[in-house]
Image (spheres, rainbow, N blue to C red):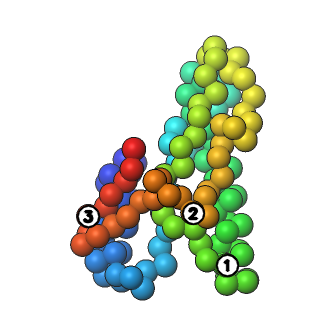
């Protein structure tokens, strides 16, 4: 599902309804796709990264938030690096390909004002 038709409008509407009281955080992962099982298929392996890696990070962040009151990182774009290489024989994934969800996203922060969502490139 295109992010412009799902998550981004939800973030904009949430900002209009809840304003500054909102606790919503949106994490957009570049080069991600929802079917991690396809990552072993030639062509998918060189172009995409697993979202499951970020699902686990987000769940751990939520656990720390609920258990200890640790603030969730703000909405952000996470710029990943595809493995590249030859389709069907992509190099192994490393943490260089998969940066962590940042506590302080800086220029990668996603913002919403008056229902308009600003997503950095």
Lower sequence index among marks 3 and 1: 1
Numbered disc 1: secondary structure = loop
Residue that appears at 59% across and 34% down:
81
Query: Are discs 1 and 2 less than 8 Å apart at CB?
Result: no
Expressed as whole percent of the image width and height from the top left, the position of residue 73 reads 57, 67
Q: Quadrant of the C terminus?
A: top left
Q: Nearer the viewer, mark 2 or mark 3?
A: 2
Numbered disc 2: secondary structure = loop
Decide if residue 21 is on the left or right side of residue 15: right
* Other-residue count near label 3 (Cα within 10 Å), few / some / many at <14 / 14–19 / ≥20: some
Expressed as whole percent of the image width and height from the top left, the position of residue 79 reads 53, 43
Checking the image for residue 116, the label placed there is 3
Q: Is residue 51 above or below residue 67?
A: above
* C-alpha span from label 2 to label 3: 21 Å
Q: Which residue is mark 1?
A: 70
Q: Which residue is mark 2?
A: 104
Expressed as whole percent of the image width and height from the top left, the position of residue 29 reads 52, 48
Q: Is residue 94 above or below residue 18?
A: above
* C-alpha span from label 1 to label 2: 13 Å
Residue that appears at 24% across and 72% down:
114
* C-alpha span from label 3 to label 1: 28 Å
* Other-residue count near label 1 (Cα within 10 Å), few / some / many at <14 / 14–19 / ≥20: few
Lower sequence index among marks 1 and 2: 1
Q: Nearer the viewer, residue 56 or 1?
A: 56
Decide if residue 94 is on the left or right side of residue 102: right
Expressed as whole percent of the image width and height from the top left, the position of residue 48 reads 57, 33
Residue 5 in view (yes/no): yes
Q: Is residue 76 above or below residue 65?
A: above
Residue at the limit of the structure toward the top, as seen here: 86
* Other-residue count near label 2 (Cα within 10 Å), few / some / many at <14 / 14–19 / ≥20: few
Numbered disc 3: secondary structure = strand
């Amino acid at each position: 599902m295109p992010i412009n038709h799902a998550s981004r409008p939800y973030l904009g509407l949430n900002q209009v309804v809840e304003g500054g009281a909102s606790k919503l955080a949106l994490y957009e992962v570049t080069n991600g796709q929802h079917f991690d099982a396809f990552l072993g298929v030639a062509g998918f392996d060189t172009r995409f990264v697993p979202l499951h890696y970020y699902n686990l990070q987000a769940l751990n962040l939520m656990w720390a938030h609920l258990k200890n009151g640790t603030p969730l990182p703000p909405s952000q774009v996470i710029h990943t690096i595809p493995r590249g290489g030859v389709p069907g024989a992509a190099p192994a994934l490393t943490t260089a390909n998969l940066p962590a969800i940042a506590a302080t996203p800086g220029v990668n922060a996603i913002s919403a004002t008056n229902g308009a969502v600003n997503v950095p490139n």
